[in-house]
Image (spheres, grey):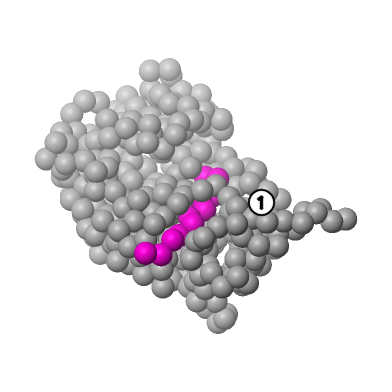
Amino acid sequence: MSQILAVRGNNPLRALERIEWPAELAVAGEATVDVVDEIPVRATVGATGSHVTGVDSDADVIVVQNPLDRFLAESVVAAKREGRRIVVDVDVDWWTIPPHAAGHRSTTSLHSSKKWLDLAVSAADLITVPSARLLDRFAGTDVEATVLRPKIPEQLIVDPETITGTGPSQIVWYGSTADQPDDLGPVSRPVRELLRTGRARLTIIGPEAGIARAFGAPFDANSFWISGELEPMAAFELLAARAGQIGIAPFKDVVFNKARGWSWPLLYAACGLVPVMSPLPEHELLKEEHGIGVLVDQGSDWRSTLTRLSVRSDERLDLARAAATGVGALTFEAAAAEWALAWLG
C-alpha cells in the first residue's frame, strides 16, 4: 500500500476541507496517510542560511497545501528530485489576493509567497484546485491541474427532517473580516435596516474584529451576537444549532473571489441553514446542479431576499431542507475515488 505524507496549510478550515477530511474519509482506504504540519527534511546550513537537501520520509506521495514559504517550496523540489509524486493543493487564487486581506497576508510576505508557490507548482505532478475559474490559471502551462470541488463529511450533514426553522429569524455569517475585508459590503445596509425593524437578529460565527466597521454602525445589543474566534468544529456546532435560519455568503465581485470554491454555502447547507449567496461562478453551479441555496446580486436584491426569508418561515424551512438534501450527493465518502485518483495518480 502506498504511503502519503499530507501537509496541511495554516488556515484551520481550509486544512480540514482540503487535507484532513479527504485523508481520513476519501483516501485512507487506498493508502496509508500521515497528516503533518511540515515535511521532515534533511538540510545543510551555509552562508545564506539553511537549505533543504532531501526529505526524511518513506512516503511515495507528498501532498502539500499552499506551499508559500521557501523552506516548504524547497522541500517540494527536493522530494520531486528523489522521485516522489508531488501533489500541490492551491485553495485560493494567491496571485490576485487583495493586498489588504490581513488574514492571508499574515501567512508570509505576499510577494515572496507567490514566488515560492510558483516554484512548488513547477515541481508538482498535479495541482488540485477547488474551482473551474482557478483551474483556468494553469491553462496553457506545462502544469497538469484538476478541480476537486469542496465536499463534506456525511456525519456533518443535518437530517433534513429534523430542521424546524422555529424561533426568531436569524441572519448568520461565518467568517472573518481579516480574511474577507470587503465582502460584507453588499449586505451591510440591508442587514442593518432589517435589524432595525426587529424582524431578525444577526449572528456572527467568528472574530469580533472589524464587524462594527463592516456593517457601518453599532447595533442594539439585543439585535446581534458574536461568537468570537472558534475552531471549525465548534463553529459547525453553532451553525447546526441554527438550522432553518439564513446563512449569508456575500462576496465582492473581484477576480480573487470569482476563483473561490463553494465552501461557505456548502457548509451552511450541511448544517441546515438556507445559503443566500453572491453569484460567484461556483455558487451558480451549486444552485444549478444541486439545487442548493438562493442567489442574490445587488444590494436591493439582498434587502428583498433577506426580508422575505426573515418573515416567511415556511419558505425558509423548505429551502433549508432542500439544501441539506442536496448536500447528500457532495460527501467525501461519495467522492472517495476522485480524491484517491488525484493524490495517488
Q: Position of residue 55 (x, y in %)?
A: 61, 60
Name the residue at the top extreme.
221
* Residue name at image x 29 percent, y 66 percent: 337
Q: Position of residue 241 (x, y in %)?
A: 27, 30
Q: 183 or 69, which is in the foreground?
A: 69
Residue 32 within the magenta-colored segment of the rendering:
no
Q: Does any portion of residue 17 appear in the rendered image? A: no
Q: Which residue is mark 1?
A: 99
Name the residue at the right extreme.
47
Q: 135 or 314, which is in the foreground?
A: 135
Q: Which quadrant of the figure has residue 274?
A: top left
Name the residue at the left extreme.
161
Tell me the quarter of the image containing the C terminus. Answer: bottom left
* Residue name at image x 18 percent, y 29 percent: 166
Q: Position of residue 256 (x, y in %)?
A: 54, 58
**Vertical side of 14 occupied by 173: above or below:** above
Q: Which quadrant of the figure has residue 290?
A: bottom left
* Residue name at image x 38 percent, y 18 percent: 222
What are the residue bounds of the magenta stretch?
1-11
Q: Is residue 13 left or right of residue 29?
A: right
